[in-house]
Image: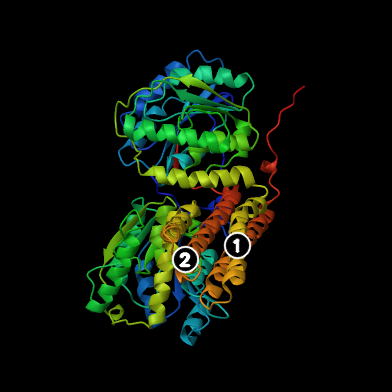
Amino acid sequence: MSSALVTAPGSVPTLSVIAPLFNEVQNVRPLVAWILQALEPYAGTFEIILVDDGSRDGTWNEVLAAAADNRVHGLRLGANVGQTAAMMAGFDNARGEVIVSLDGDLQNDPRDIPALVAKLDEGYDLVCGWRQRRQDKLLLRKVPSWLANRLIRRLTGVPIRDNGCSLKAYRRDLLNRISLYAEQHRFIPALSASVGARITEMPVRHHARRFGESKYGISRTLKVLVDLITLKMITTFRSRPLLGFGLAALPPLVVAAIFGALWLFSLTHFGPIKATALVFPGAGLLTLGVAFYLIMLGLVAEVALNSERGDANDIPNAWEVR
Amino acid sequence: MSAQGILMEPTSNSSKSGAAADTGLISVVVPVVERADDLLAVYHAFAKELGARPEDHEFLFVFDGRFTPPPELMALAVENPGIRVLRFARSFGETAALRLGIEKSRGDLVITIPAYFQVQPEGIKLLLDAVSGGADMVVASRSPRLDSWLNRVQSRAFQSIVGGVSEQRFHDMACGVRVMRRSVAEALPLYGDLHRFIPALALREGFRVEEVSIPQHPSDARTRVYRPGIYLRRLLDIATFFFLAKFTEKPLRFFGLVGSLFMGMGAVLSLVLLIQRVEGQGIANRPALLLAVLFMALGVQLVGLGLVGEIIVHLRAPHRRAYRVRERV
């Protein structure tokens, strides 16, 4: 799937800039102009990859027009697959050793790209943008985002303050190690950390939306919460699921023991009464069943893991110190 | 924003069948399952329509185990190399028959038709024209319909349930008359009983799907009433499709939702019991405690299942892409 784009005359670019677009017809032209202008001082060669994520408003025609410049490439996806998959499409087709992603809605500032790339060259695998003076609605965007970031930070221990910013710079090696799916673009820092990437963040500019509409709503909060459970499971127990499920089986075991103790207590103190003889042992057995069930599930997960093993991607990221 | 495709294996992208696609050839796949009328009449009617076109055509009859190829057809196949007859040793169903037909076919375009007259054969022209117009797949919609109201109600119910999941509304997904490009036919994730959802599957894979109205054939208009078991299977098919469409990439969202519902009920019940216990009412002799524990146990089990699903999805992720590139510049 990762066949390179038709090679433009000249060498392979060192930097690939990726912008996913969904119904951004008015933003394409200014975005491309802005990126080109911002990369004027960039020393190496670069390419811009515009990913049209199944837009229905003529975005693709704008991309075609922009692609007249041979540094600009366009990918048109067959259906609207969401930001994560659109970014993956860009990553898979990027040729640069360094890859930068940014939003297609002009809210990120391309003038920050050279600084991000310079930071990456200081010896990082991932540099995350950290939006300063965010220009979004307070209640709908900033508050949920603040909460989500705190939660992600607590749960994963990765000290990144703005997980939701699309403006990021990646080293190619890192992207080869992580595969994003569903809506995991928010968790790129945590997933990268779990494969051993060196991560940092730096302040970037943020602008209010000029054209078009935001594609986010508050309904995603619950989804993000569920996804966080998955993230925790994947980042912590990816290579040893039985441990995770075994730990999860401990509380039911304790509860089962309590019910057992209650049963013994009521037997010895009140004698064998018919109704009493059923409830506590029944509840105890149920919870015991849950504990066993969880351990069995852990074994199933181990079987799944075993059948998929053998990818080089399993080896954590490392670098030669000297 | 959340339209996630059914995941496609990157390998299915390249033509995996040994035979290279023939650009001047149309393959007609006829799965002979469930119902077979006069196959020769079907063949002659459609061959006549296709014969008027510049492209060559071939017919592949795929017989499910329950059907034996009629001798007249075999005789015709012997003298006409454009007719191929394939047969399963036992019954594998329509999806398997379609897959086999697609794999053995060589044409650049693949047409599927049922083994009886579902639509007027003249209509096939319209489908082929729509494909020339740029669509990746064109499906027929029987209209005007001659069926009894019972058939229409059944069909309507099916469409409305499926329509809730699919992005584009199809009026007649049950119609077996379709024209598709070879690339689409090979990329379809066909297994189980998913053939009923072919247009929706193609759409999710990122192909352009169009619908063309073709008048229904009178012989398709008999009233169909099935055994209750069949309706149950249809419902399960819909459930499968619904789950695949919505949650293949994030099983925990489904299992987590149902699981936390149960856990919530269990927690509320336990809380009530706890309050009553504090107020002095014993709980040792109350089966309600069992119910509360049962609910919570169920909830934990469902969430656990969802987590295993997530692990499997995560492990498969490096081999899989949720997008399809339609054009590049």
For residue B279, side relative to residue A10 (left or right) = left
Kindly identify which residue carries mark 1: A256
For residue B312, side relative to residue B190 (left or right) = right
Screen quadrant of the C terminus of chain B:
top left
Label 2 Cα crowd, 10 Å radius (few <14 / some 14-19 / many 20+): few
As drawn, the label of residue B144 is none
Res A305 visible: yes
Q: Residue A193, located in which quarter of the rendered image? A: top right
Kindly identify which residue carries mark 2: B282
**Label 1 sits on what residue type?**
Ala
Are the numbered discs 1 and 2 placed on the same chain, yes or no? no
Q: In which chain is the residue bearing label 2?
A: B
- Kindly identify the residue that appears in the image at 47 percent across and 14 percent down: A40
Helix, strand or loop at mark 2: loop
Give how far across and how far down residue B197 sits, in percent: 40, 64
Give how far across and how far down residue A186 sits, in percent: 48, 37
**Label 2 sits on what residue type?**
Gly
Give how far across and how far down residue A263 sits, in percent: 59, 68
Helix, strand or loop at mark 1: helix
Q: Residue furthest front?
A: A269
Depth check, front residue: B127 or B51: B127
Spatial CA span between label 1 and label 2: 19 Å
